[in-house]
Image: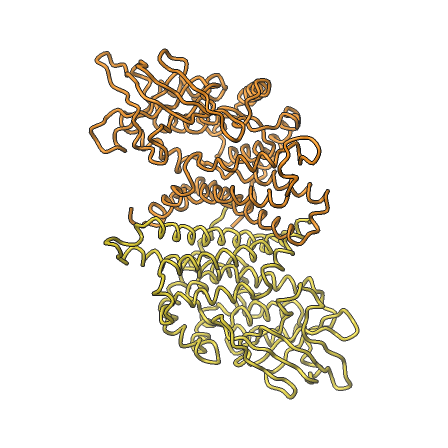
Amino acid sequence: MDLHFSQEAEAWRKEVRDFLDADLPPEKEFETEFDEDDGRWNFALAFSKKVGAKKWTCLSWPKQYGGLERPFVYETIFRDEFAYRSAPLVNSTGLGLAAGTLLNFGSEKQKREHLPAIASMKTLWAEGFSEPNAGSDLASLQTRAELQASGDWLVNGQKTYITWAHRCDVLYLAARTDPNVPKHKGISIFCMPLRAKGVTMQALMNIGGGRQNHIFIENVRLPADAIIGEPNQGWRYITNALWGGAPSGTEWARYKRAFDDLVTFCRHTGLSKDPIVRDKLVDLAMGFEVLKLLEYEEIWRLEQQLEPAFAGSIGVLFMKEFNTRFANITSEILGASGLFLEGKGAVLKGRLAELYVRSYGNHAGGTPQTKRMVLATRGLGLPR
Amino acid sequence: MDLGYSQEQKMLKQAARDFLSKEAPMAKVRAALETTTGYDHALWKQLASLGWLGLPFRADVGGGDGSIVDLAALYEEFGRALLPSPHLETVVICGGLIQAFAAQEQRKRLLPAIAKGDLVITPLLPKPGLPPGPDSAGMRTRRTDTGWTLNGTADMVTFGDSAEACLCLAKVEGTHQLALFDLAAERPGMSVTERPNITSQRLYTVSFENVHAAPGSLIGQPGMGWKTVQAVLDRAAVLRCAQLTGACARALEMAVDYARTRVQFGQPIGKFQGVQWLAADAAVAAHTASLMTAQAAWAIDAGLPHEREVALAKAYASIAARDGIRAAHEVFAGVAFIAEHDMHLYARHAKFWEISLGEVRHFKERAAQAMGL
């Protein structure tokens, strides 16, 4: 049992902090998912390119694809520090889902073509999963990709709720390539340019202040090498990326930051002396402490090549359930002050008020209910 | 970063599981709970021969030099088995206080006796309903010509009917000093009253009215620092967390086994999402409580400040295990409401362990203070 990070890892943490202190002014801290201001987006892109130039976007990747081959714990520390500072790093789908699939299942040519472009922020990726009739039951997706005599693929269908699509270059597209087999066995993954002929978009403004998109795909032609990995293996790639495989983290540092901000407010207003408020603050502290330990456990298991606990579902489930609890308790403590976005009475320029509304986005990446089903069936072996 | 037990700790844990499943099956646990002794004395001697009664003591008194993480590995198994034993009272708390405060001669006399299973001694501790501190000691004492006189009451005393001795923490009248006495269990002026309660632990109120203590029964010297007492109680609190964790994990296993085989509406109930969610809740509770316990145990062993970690762990594990065991109970529904089913014993033990050594709200307040609130 040892919950310390190594000296090298702590030195790395300091290096990341020093960079953030120098290159991220506090007024530029924001979540790119929930901000449509073009000026801020441009800052985020320039900032992300700076991070990419340092190769911090591909810390653990093999050297031949531009990576630094650092242990996974470097990624965890990097992510924690960036999350604590709300550093606006873009391309999370490229760096996570796309790079994970490419590294594990992509062809040599695809790895060399796509990975450096993802890491340097030259190519930004969006996630093309949800459809009007395929949400939690993702495997029932209907977008079709048909193999042509020429070897090209012809794609038709509709994707929906696609975050960042209007800012991105390519879509990590899940499409049905074989309609004659059980639904999980006929899905393939493609890299689809978002500016291809036949792709149109329609904005969907969400309640957190961000934009998502409908994507209409009409007779879009993709070359033979647009398919990632093997045909009809898409479900395996998706579940691997969403439900284990890569270290996904638990965003505990994001909550720790909000907690620290909240405590500052409570001290300033004297609320921290109120026994009811103290009790609630400790409830919050217990939650992010558990999240921290779940993240540490994940990284330790990965290093030891142990299977993730409960099929990798427990961290994300706890995070999702804590997310709602955190927002509710925080908002209760703030009371009326928790309503205002700016001006007199607004706390931290409305940051904690925004957090409350954004907490309703608990479905992203799978609802807590589906995660519980995964935990119960795959993690505990209950019958499906 | 290492959140796992070492090879030796895994072996200890496995040995404990094998031993307890063979020697302490639920029928034996229930039989022990029925008696006013509250534990099985033959089993206690077996624990001694396995070296578990001296595990935390130093080697010079026949101990095993065990760490808190070692003990936590063992205590998870004690929790799983719901083992009725005065181990925490005698070995961890009394043994810990003796190790910290006793004179050399007393240590060499008392600790080997505990390790051999020859001495069961229970502590008279501050009331759990008060913020912990020297003022929460329920007993007070004053010096007399022939030794000391003790007065006062201790609540929530365990093994009050069967312990051969008690270790009494008392406040020296007119001072802020604490003094510790080793007293044989029966003496004039002492009364022991059993308190019927909802947990599966027999609890007693011990009252002293001008109880005489000879000078030799004083452990160490008066004026022991509360911090050292607190350090011993913190270790005990972490081990309560390990028991809670083990009990919750076992309750989950029982619920999952039942949900796989119990058929209603033509299918195993474990196929229903409503039941799956209960199981998922119990799993999250048991697993996260074990992580919080591990962190606190490690912080103590590593010699780090651990006020916050221990307080968060005890508050968290108490709530999580209670909720997890309740979720497991709900999977069984009416079956578990019948007393012959074992599930209620998990809930009853968890309730006692929750209150033992300090209520949740006090651990939360300690955590708040440790976080600078």
> Does residue B130 lie above or below A332 as drawn?
below
Find the residue positioned furthest to the right. Answer: B174
Residue A353 place in picture, x, y as percent: 60, 36
Q: Nearer the viewer, residue B218 or A243?
A: A243
Find residue A191 and report its image quarter: top left
> Does residue A382 lie above or below B52 as drawn?
above
Whether residue B207 sits left or right of residue B75 in the image: it is: right
- On the question of residue B159 being in view, the answer is yes
| Residue at image coords 31%, 52% | B270
Whether residue B233 sits left or right of residue A273 in the image: it is: left
Q: Nearer the viewer, residue A288 or B67?
A: A288
Find the residue positioned furthest to the bottom. Answer: B188
Q: How many marks?
A: 0
Find residue B263 and report its image quarter: bottom left
Residue B84 place in picture, x, y as percent: 46, 71
Q: Colour of chain B?
A: yellow
- On the question of residue A66 being in view, the answer is no
Q: How is the image coloured?
A: by chain
| Residue at image coords 65%, 63% | B230
Whether residue A40 sits left or right of residue A183 in the image: it is: right
Q: Colour of chain A?
A: orange
Residue A86 place in picture, x, y as percent: 59, 31
Residue A67 place in picture, x, y as percent: 47, 24
> Does residue B263 lie above or below A362 as drawn?
below
| Residue at image coords 47%, 67% | B348
Q: Nearer the viewer, residue B67 or A171?
A: A171
